[in-house]
């Protein structure tokens, strides 16, 4: 059995295509920041900006701060924030 390694860029682009939230993309971004895997950050940032033109800085802040891993707070019966 052989494993197929995907680049960070492919993973994040796929997550965006699959409809992941900004918080989920920030989680992948944060994990990539912590890894030593070579990453084409321009390609990643371009993919994020293509999907969310005004949210790259928000996603970066969530990733760099680690806040993307915190559970959203509850705002009533069965409703969560994000």
Image (tube, grey):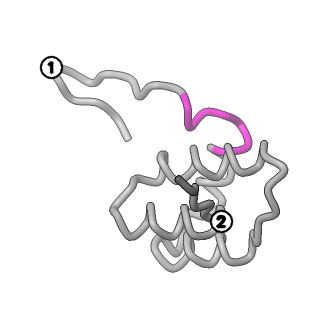
Please give left or right for residue 30 compared with residue 34 in the image.
left
Question: Dot 1, how many residues are within 10 Å of its Cα: few (below 14), some (14-19), or many (20+)?
Answer: few
Quarter where residue 14 is shown: bottom left
Write the start and end of the magenta stretch as one range.
63-69
Residue at position x 51%, y 70% in the image: 13
Please give left or right for residue 80 compared with residue 9 in the image.
left
Residue 8 image label? none
Residue 68 screen position, x and y as percent:
56, 37
Q: Is residue 67 above or below residue 35?
A: above
Residue 26 screen position, x and y as percent:
57, 49
Tally of numbered discs: 2
Q: Closer to the camera, 24 or 58?
A: 24
Please give left or right for residue 68 compared with residue 31 in the image.
left
State the residue position of label 1.
Answer: 77
Residue at position x 33%, y 61% in the image: 19
Split into 4 quadrants, where in the image is the C terminus? top left
In the rendered image, the residue lying farthest to the left is: 77
Residue 74 screen position, x and y as percent:
31, 22
State the residue position of label 2.
Answer: 7
Q: Is residue 74 above or below residue 3?
A: above
Q: Closer to the camera, 76 or 5?
A: 5
Residue at position x 68%, y 77% in the image: 43
Question: Dot 2, how many residues are within 10 Å of its Cα: few (below 14), some (14-19), or many (20+)?
Answer: some
Please give left or right for residue 48 compared with residue 40 in the image.
left
Q: At numbered mark 2, what does the secondary structure look like: helix, strand or loop?
A: loop
Q: Closer to the camera, 69 or 55?
A: 69
**Please, what is the dominant secondary structure of the magenta stretch?**
helix
Residue 64 in magenta?
A: yes
């Amino acid at each position: 059995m052989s494993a197929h390694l995907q680049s960070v860029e492919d993973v994040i682009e796929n997550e965006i295509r699959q409809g992941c939230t900004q918080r989920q993309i920030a989680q992948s971004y944060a994990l990539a920041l912590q890894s030593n895997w070579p990453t084409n950050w321009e390609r990643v940032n371009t993919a994020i900006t293509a999907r969310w033109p005004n949210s790259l800085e928000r996603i970066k802040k969530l990733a760099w701060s680690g806040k993307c891993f915190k559970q959203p707070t509850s705002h009533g019966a069965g409703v969560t924030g994000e």
